[in-house]
Image: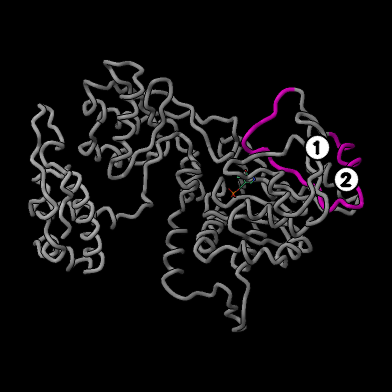
Amino acid sequence: MPRPPESVVHGSQAPQTASNHPVPTALPQQLPALDKLLRLPSAAAAVAAHGHTLVADTGRVLLADLRAQALAGTLPLDAVAPAALADALQQRLASRLAPRMQRVLNLTGTVIHTNLGRALLADAALAHVQAMMAGPNNLEYDLATGSRGDRDSIVEGLLCELTGAEAATVVNNNAAAVLLTLAALARGKEVIVSRGELVEIGGAFRMPDVMESAGAKLVEVGTTNRTHPADYERAITDQTALLMKVHTSNYQVQGFTSAVDEATLAGIARSRGLPLATDLGAGALIDMAAYGLPREPTPQEMLRAGCGVVTFSGDKLLGGPQAGLIVGSNELIARIRKFPMKRALRMSKLPLAALEATLMLYQQPEHLAQALPTLRLLTRPLADIQATAQAVLAALGPALAPRYGVEVVALQGQIGSGSLPVERLPSAGVAIAPVDAPRSGRALDALATALRQLPLPVVGRIADGRLILDCRCLEEASSLTQQIPFLRP
Ligand SMILES: *Cc1c(COP(=O)(O)O)cnc(C)c1O
């Protein structure tokens, strides 16, 4: 065992207590050897439960850290007591055994929150994933003929049925769908897009950059606020491969504006023998207005208007797993599917199972608002949300008094993920503010941190000197209120 360097004077450099008495410190040689640490009763139990490899490795790192502290003269003497060592080992083991990916409660007021995993999967999708992943499946195997099949065929029929498309294919996410569509249809050629639609989605998805990655040349037409049919017509040359519309899903240009709609643009494209592609982003497969929600264009409308290809996300308004859906004409989808990059962007069996089960829910539209969590949360009655907020107030108010005041407030939520950016959903929740130090950022941050440290972390938002917990996505008040005993603000 290495000896402490002579220069370390134990005691004199020791940590100070609040009353300024030095704390007695431990010497490196007071630490046990690894095998002795592993013979402590709780450590031996851990070895029996988790195996020697993990526990011994954790013990080795623990002892090395403690030895470094002892050499620096900063290791309190009571940290080398057997019970303290056993505790420290347990804590480190628990942390290594806890997954980094954790469930949280999304009380941000944004229903489809990209940082919190976007759409929640429906029970039917979870069950299908579980059932399909538990054994081999017919991912690329045709059970009728006993020969090789195509994984696209698992959802192609459903996608065509639901959108009216002739053909469909799927990739990892919508960014991949746009990249693949551009590369397959326009590599080395020109794509015409309105200046009003050169969107950035966030997470480095910018239309001009995607165009470049796909090897296509972007030809911008019109201005930020106004683009006319003649702008497209004038820009078409023998180098043009594609006309493209991009749904401005995360912003709106208002005022003196003009854009060319898909039907008009499809007419221009057709007369020049060119395809028209539309990137929709949000991907509502149903008329949102029928559910009292703001309208969002659907792929079926785009196809009817004459678009040859439509791309959209699986985990935004569609309410499924991360996926990029590409629907369109037989000829264009065949070119996209054959393009070699498709192999690198293809969907894995896990989300594919979830996507199939999610799309199947759309076959029964009468049950959709109940079965699809995204739609259920977006259409949740305000009175229901208010009742949840009251239940949260009743439990949280007394627990946070007298340091914090809690009240029920009316809120404006968002759909999220770039869907319907301007629209707000009337919602309700609780607002929490420090009583002594109104508008104290530190007290609010401390409370927000304590909420995130709960067993099921609670994520709210801070606005106008208050911590806001929007209750739209809190379907059971108890999933928050039963955690209150663990709250350490
Ligand atoms: C969200 C979005 C994308 C990217 O989709 P992902 O599924 O996140 O890859 C692309 N285009 C538009 C218009 C979008 O709204």
Residue nearest the viewer, comparing 277 with 346 = 346
Q: Is residue 118 visible?
A: yes
For badge 2, the amino acid type reads Ile
Mark 2: give few (<14), some (14-19) or many (20+) Cα within 10 Å. Answer: many
For badge 1, the amino acid type reads Val
Residue nearest the viewer, comparing 349 with 389 = 349
**Residue at x-position 29% and y-position 40%:** 453
Percent coordinates x, y for residue 75 in the rendering: 15, 45
Residue segment shown in magenta: 228-255
Tell me: residue 420, above or below residue 270. above
Percent coordinates x, y for residue 431 in the rendering: 36, 24
**First in sequence: mark 2 vs mark 1:** 1
Q: Quadrant of the C terminus?
A: top left
Mark 1: give few (<14), some (14-19) or many (20+) Cα within 10 Å. Answer: some
Q: Which residue is mark 2?
A: 268
Q: Is residue 286 visible?
A: no
**Residue at x-position 70% and y-position 56%:** 164
Q: Quadrant of the N terminus?
A: bottom left
Q: Are marks 2 and 1 in contact (CB under 8 Å)?
A: yes
**Residue at x-position 52% and y-position 56%:** 358
Residue 29, label in figure: none
Percent coordinates x, y for residue 6 in the rendering: 15, 47
Q: Which residue is mark 1?
A: 260
Residue nearest the viewer, comparing 8 with 259 = 8
- Total labels drawn: 2
Residue 248 magenta-drawn? Answer: yes
